[in-house]
Each structure stands twice: as structure tokens, then as C-alpha cells.
Amino acid sequence: MRVLLAYTNECLDFLPPPPIGLAYVASATRRAGHEVEFVDLLLAEDPIATLRRAIGAFRPDVVGLSVRNIDNVVHQRLQPFMSRLDAQLRAVRGSTPAPIVLGGPAVSIMGAAALQRLDADYAILGEGEEAFPRLLAALAGDAALDGVPGLARRGESAASGPQAYTARFGASSLEHWIDWRDYARQGATWPVQTKRGCPLRCSYCTYAAVEGLGIRKRDPEAVAEEIEAVQGRFSPRCFEFIDSTFNLPPSHAIAVCEAIIRRGLRVNLTTMGVNPLAVSRELLRAMKAAGFRSLMITPEAAHDRMLDGMDKGFDTSHVHHAAKLIRASGMSSMWFFMLGGPGEDAETVEATVRFAEKSLRGPDCLSLFTTGIRILPGTALARQAIADGTLAANADLIEPHFYFSRDIGEAAILDRIDQAKARNPGIVHASEDIGDTSQLRTVNRLLDKLHVAPPYWRFLPRLLALRPAGQRGRSGGRRLSSTAVEARPGE
């Protein structure tokens, strides 16, 4: 069959995220004997025109769309992405009679309800490397639709079976599907997965729907071999491990670092997922020796009551210990905090903000705050909000709803963050307008020409220190259509 696969994401954020998930699916589809056309809309000047041209030239039998995000999860600067996806789907419907299949993280989160909201024929819930080729075989008449794992069909309220997860996986073969030069000019990092699945049960998180709870680890030598092969062909300035949590289990993270060290690879490394629970001197030594220059860490709070309420699995002693060790390592770090969840009050806000103020100072630390927690389908937070009576049981969570504790006002939280920004310029609220997309692209291109290794967020604390606090503006921008869900006092 002739299969067109499109990466629908148009959101750049700090750095453009390459379509690693769709690359896995495209490679599996080609191995199954199909002809694949890969369309990347992220850096396209006119995504709709690009999509139409590709369909007209390729004349596909099936069109698959990978959907990365429902929205940007920032209450004060909300960017819903469903309207963009609707426009893309209209372009596909108007260009070909081929059936449309949805996949990707956002579709796994939405579940079968995605097909009640979006004009498509099928959806794959979970990972697509095995399920999508099986769907193609069924559409060709060589297999039954009921045998496709995680398949949702238009007009049906549930998937035909459990979500699809691949038992074993290897390299993404991303290099076969994108023009890396375009991504490099925008400061992208080359994504690598060392494992999938997350056994943690954080109350707000959807990784269980996207990757499942069971961890599936790759051989560390195979990970190092992938990096060596890509480095030899494309020389990316930085590789990024995009596991949901890179350092759990810590033994596997250390083994990956040791495999890279044994090969003598001279690479820059970073990761998006470090958990404070498993930060140790041994881990950080191995990471630095392998080539890590930066990392992202996700404590979300620095007060035990909030950490317990979010089911993080660690306490404030782990957060403070991780901060001490990471700062001593000399690696740049970006810390993520979420304020306003169940049980939040002035005391808990003060503890978290003060931790960022005092313990995460200096040019190597960036602290990013969000205020209000996006309630996503299937999460414990969604169930808690319904049990509290603060969210209707039939609420459509594809539309943005945010949880705010009624024990402290949103304005008070934002005011406290603004005070902290004046004391520590490395503190940023996600609603801040620190540069529009065109400005960010210009800066990224300049740094690329100077051969500076990404991720470029590590320069933000220095840049923000040059800007007087009064020029940064207040946190909390113009709100678009969203619902702030407030808990009743004492609940």
C-alpha cells in the first residue's frame, strides 16, 4: 500500500521536537513492505499547503497523522492545538478518499473519544510499530480488524482491545525520514530512547496511557551503537535521552553512560527526564564522563504535602539532595514546578518558591513554573476532581480544564513568583513572553552558526540576569478559552 504519514505538530516551544515516534512507525511500515511518504509539518512555512501537495503527488491509499499535543498546558497563555488539527484533517479529506488513521501521544491520551471529536476513521491507542502495520494488513483484506491492538473505530465508544505496546524496540531510524539540517539550524537535539514505560503513578501524568507502566529497556550497547552511527553521519551537536524518566532504574542509566564511555564517543548529551529520587554522585559522575552537560529535572514541588498529593514517590529531602549534587556537578539544570494542585496553600507555595529562590540560583539553573494543573483524561487528578465535585463527571477533557486549589488564589501564586523572579532571574513562569517564535528562531539560527551545542535553554539564566526585573513583565498573560476548576475549601 501507499502510506502517507504526517507529523502534525506545529509547536516549537523552546526547541523543535523531532518526530521520533512517527519515525519508529514509518520504519516499521516500510519493513512490512509498504511504500511510505513522510511529511513533516513542524518547520513547514505553510503546513496545509505542504500537506495538500504531498497528498496530490503521492496519491496515498492510507493517510496517518501523528498528534503530539492537545494543547500547551499553560493556563495563562493557552494554545489549543485541536483547531489546527481540524484544519489539517479538512485538507486531507478534501484531497483524497483514503482512510485517515490517527496516532501519537495526544491520541493515546484522548482514547477512543478522539474519533468523536476529530474527523478520522481509525485511531491507534498506544505504540504504533506493530499495531499500524497490522491495521494496514486488515485494510488490505489480509487480516481482521479485531486483531489490531489498541484500535478505535469511528462510531464506536471504545477500542477493540488493550492499548498497543511494543515488547522490544531498537533505533528509531529518524535519519531516514527528516532533513536534520533544518532541525539543527533551529537548535534541536537528536532524540534517543533507552527504554519505554513508566511504573510511576504521578496523579496528573499520562505516560501510562502513552507508554504503559511496564519498563522495556534497550541493551545499553545498542544505545551507544545508535549514537555512534548517527554521530558518524550527521554529527549532531547534542543527543537527548527522551525517556519519561532517564534515571529510573539508575543502574540502567549508568550502564548506558558506561557503554558510551567505553566507545570513546565525544558527544554532548542531555536528558529531559531526571527524577530526584535516584540522583546520586555515582550517577552524575557517569553522566558527566559520558558527555552530559545539562539535564532537566521534574520535582514539581518542594513541600512534602504536595509531593504526597501528586504521588511523586519521593519527599523534599530527595529534592534538596538532588539540587546539592547537581549544582556541585557543574551541569546546567532546568527544574519544573507546578503550583495550584489539590491541597496547595500559602505555606506550600512559599516552600516551593523559596526553594527555587535560594537553592537554584546562579547561571546554571533555570526554574520553570506553571500555575494551575491541566486535568488530562484518565489521570488520578481527573478522578479526584470529579470526586471533589469540582469537575463534572461528563466533562470533555479534550477541552482544557485546569485544577486550582481554592486554599490560595491564582493571583497570589503569580505575585509570589514575580517576587521570586526579582530575586533570582533564573526563575521563569511559563506564561512569560520571553520572545516570540520568530525571535527564538533567529537566536537559534545564530547560535547554530556559531557552532554552539544545544540545548539553548541553558543560556536563559544568563540572558535574563541582564534584563531588569521590571522589564520582564508580570506572570500570567491573556487567557484563552479554558476552565479553571477550583477545589472546595478543605478538600
Image: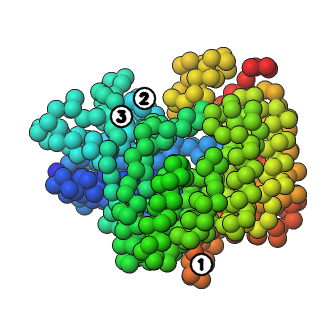
Q: Which mark is residue 113?
A: 2
- Residue 178 appears in view: no
Q: Residue at x 22, y 29 (%)?
A: 146
- Residue 147 appears in view: yes
Query: Which residue is under mark 3?
Result: 163
Q: Which mark is residue 139?
A: none
Label 2: which secondary element: helix
Which numbered disc, 1 or 3, marks the residue that appears first in the sequence? 3
Q: Nearer the viewer, mark 3 or mark 2?
A: 3
* Amino acid type of the residue that numbered disc 1 sits on in the rendered structure: Val
> With 13 as the anchor, is 363 left or right in this view?
right
Q: Residue at x 39, y 73 (%)?
A: 228
Assign the C terminus to one quadrant of the image: top right
Q: Quadrant of residue 177?
A: bottom left
Closer-to-camera residue (477/192): 192
Return the residue found at the far bottom.
450
Query: Which residue is under mark 1?
Result: 452
* Amino acid type of the residue that numbered disc 2 sits on in the rendered structure: Ala
Residue 257: x, y in percent?
A: 49, 64
How many numbered marks have been drawn onto this rendered protein structure?
A: 3
Q: Mark 2 Cα within 10 Å, few/some/many (few <14, many 20+)?
A: many
Q: Quadrant of residue 90?
A: top left
CA gap between label 1 and label 3 equals 41 Å
Closer-to-camera residue (372/253): 253
